[in-house]
Amino acid sequence: MCTVETTQPPIPAEVHQLLAAQQAGKLTRRDFVEQAGALLFRSLKPEAVYRDNRFNAPDAPIMTPPLMLAATPTTPLATKGGMVTIQTSHAPIPGYLAQPEAAGSYPGVVVIQEWWGLDDHIKSVADYFARSGFVALAPDLYHGEIAREPDEARKLAMGLIADQANADVQGAADYLVSLDNVQPKKVGTVGFCMGGGISMRMSWAGGSNIGAVVIFYGRGNPTDDEIKAIHAPVLGIFGEQDAGIPISGVREWEAKLKANGKTVEIVTYPDAGHAFVNDTRPAYRPEAAEDALQRTVKWFMKYLKISS
């Protein structure tokens, strides 16, 4: 049954054509969302597209929306994005900045890459947060390099200096709070895989403008001294099928944080493994990814003191 109100105008023929191209592998999810979104904002609520049976073949089930059309607490916003230069304590680095098109004040979020680098997927995650009402900045920790194969990614990740990565992320946070349209002047950090561990480090190594932290399947396990220095609420998100990060270990450091009076919440997904939010990889689990990203938005809304 169609769930779009009958007062909605028909879905433009161009959107059907874009969908066919995306299903045939001729168009990426990111390109589909951007191009279809531009058409749909003139006629439909974007989240209604995938719930309308007119959008599917007569006998087909209603489709699960791609990650970047996932429902958020408010109607997705029109956004703009582009590369910027971030000043850090050691050198300028590039970064991808995504933000709502409409004038106004928005909270800031630093999006920290996986070991692949600042690729299209990480940019699309920044776009997701922009559509959810944040100004999102993804610093390029590899300074222009992107890995295509695991061996290449491993070499780049192993060559990353921890203190320099921390400085790059802190530089991105400083950049965000310097913007007139970013309020409050405390930002969140969210990282994935390798970036999850870096995001975790920001909970104790980041400056006073780090107000909340989220880690997606990244290594935590802080030392006792690091636990004592944690100053930002921590949300950890993990897949129970992740062979590289046993949930038992996660629960251990969660208990240590709580014993030390720190604000922490751990969420696990039984049917998900590592990198389950990455919709360009076989590990992608759309339902878990959607739920996890919505939890992240709510975490930032709560701990960055944003009115819902």
Image: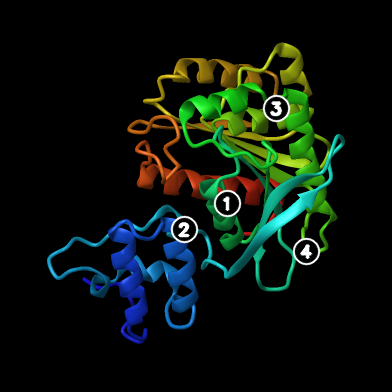
Residue under numbered circle 2: 30
Gap between marks 3 and 1 measured at Cα: 22 Å
> In the picture provided, is 26 more to the left or to the right than 229?
left
Q: Position of residue 286 (x, y in %)?
A: 37, 47
Kindly identify the amino acid type of the residue bearing the numbered disc 4. Answer: Asn
Q: Is disc 1 in contact with disc 2, using a CB cutoff of under 8 Å?
A: yes
Q: How many numbered marks does the figure carry?
A: 4
Q: Is disc 3 in contact with disc 2, using a CB cutoff of under 8 Å?
A: no
Q: Earlier in the sequence, mark 1 or mark 4?
A: 1
Local crowd size for mark 1, using a 10 Å CA cut-off: few (<14), some (14–19), many (≥20): many
Q: Earlier in the sequence, mark 3 or mark 1?
A: 1
Tell me the residue at 64%/62% (across/down): 81
Of badges 3 and 1, nearer the viewer stands: 1
Kindly identify the amino acid type of the residue bearing the numbered disc 3. Answer: Arg
Kindly identify the amino acid type of the residue bearing the numbered disc 1. Answer: Lys
In which quadrant of the rendered image does the N terminus lie?
bottom left
Of badges 1 and 4, nearer the viewer stands: 1
The quarter of the displayed image where residue 58 is located:
bottom left
Residue under numbered circle 3: 201
For residue 202, above or below residue 221 = below
